[in-house]
Amino acid sequence: DIQVTQSPSSLSASVGDRVTITCRASQGISNKLAWYQQKPGKVPKLLVYAASTLQSGVPSRFSGSGSGTDFTLTISSLQPEDVATYSCQKYDAAPWTFGQGTKVEI
Amino acid sequence: QVQLQQSGPGLVKPSQTLSLTCAISGDSVSSNSVAWNWIRQSPSRGLEWLGRTFYRSQWYHDYAVSMKGRITINPDTSKNQFSLQLNSVTPEDTAWYYCARDRGSYYPFDYWGQGTLVTVSS
């Protein structure tokens, strides 16, 4: 099975900072990668799919990039409401697998 | 707007069967273009996809290898819902369980249920 490895596991940044989270797949998955945001006590919310397409309603400060094995989620200007855990997920083929998550704090 | 409403017990005894249901509104369990999934989340294992059911002129099921032999996901067309059964549970199966929709094999999970915390304990 293809594994996805996410880094870092946690980070702390200031409001207004640029934040970058990476996800690496053990084999190429084309652009079949999604990013989710999960706020404390809430359900995961789809942010980005097809590596770089923002889900409807997601603020433009979020962006995704990458293809093949290396992917990035960027928050261009961190806001207090962005405190959450961010997880990547590959969906090129079953089994769908998730990264271990990155906890973002202010 | 698609909504998924989960129901089922939050406490299951070891060796017994975990049973959850996900009621669908705004879509059909028999849709030819989506799939219906179960995912769980625990501190030790993170987010873990368990399996799915979908209809493409007939019913199909995919299950995570780690779950095979213990898991059954079934559609219920009369009630527009689908269910999860996980047999022979142990404390390691304690987790938040979510149902979720995907729009086909090359799409991620776009709608999620509210989650159910299932604790396996005597």
Image (cartoon, rainbow, N blue to C red):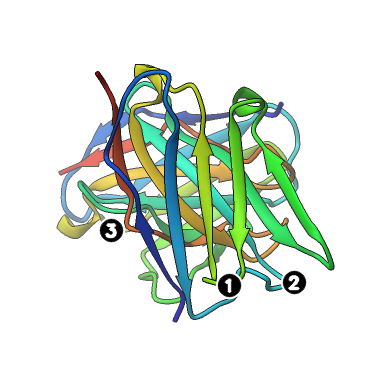
Disc 3: CA contacts within 10 A as few (<14), some (14-19) or many (>=20): some
Q: Position of residue B26 (x, y in %)?
A: 49, 80
Camera-nearest label, 1 or 3? 1
Query: In front: A19, or B38?
Result: B38
**Label 3: which residue?**
A77
SS state under label 1: loop
**Label 2: which residue?**
B32
Q: Quadrant of the N terminus of chain B?
A: bottom left
Q: In the figure, is residue B116 to the left or right of A99?
A: left
Q: Position of residue B11 (x, y in %)?
A: 26, 34
Query: In front: A105, or B78?
Result: B78
**Image vertical order of residue A7 relative to residue A60, above or below:** above
Q: Position of residue B31 (x, y in %)?
A: 68, 73
Camera-nearest label, 1 or 2? 1
Q: Are marks 3 and 2 in contact (CB under 8 Å)?
A: no
Dot 2 amino acid type: Asn
**Label 1: which residue?**
B78
**Chain holding disc 1:** B
Q: Are marks 1 and 2 in contact (CB under 8 Å)?
A: no
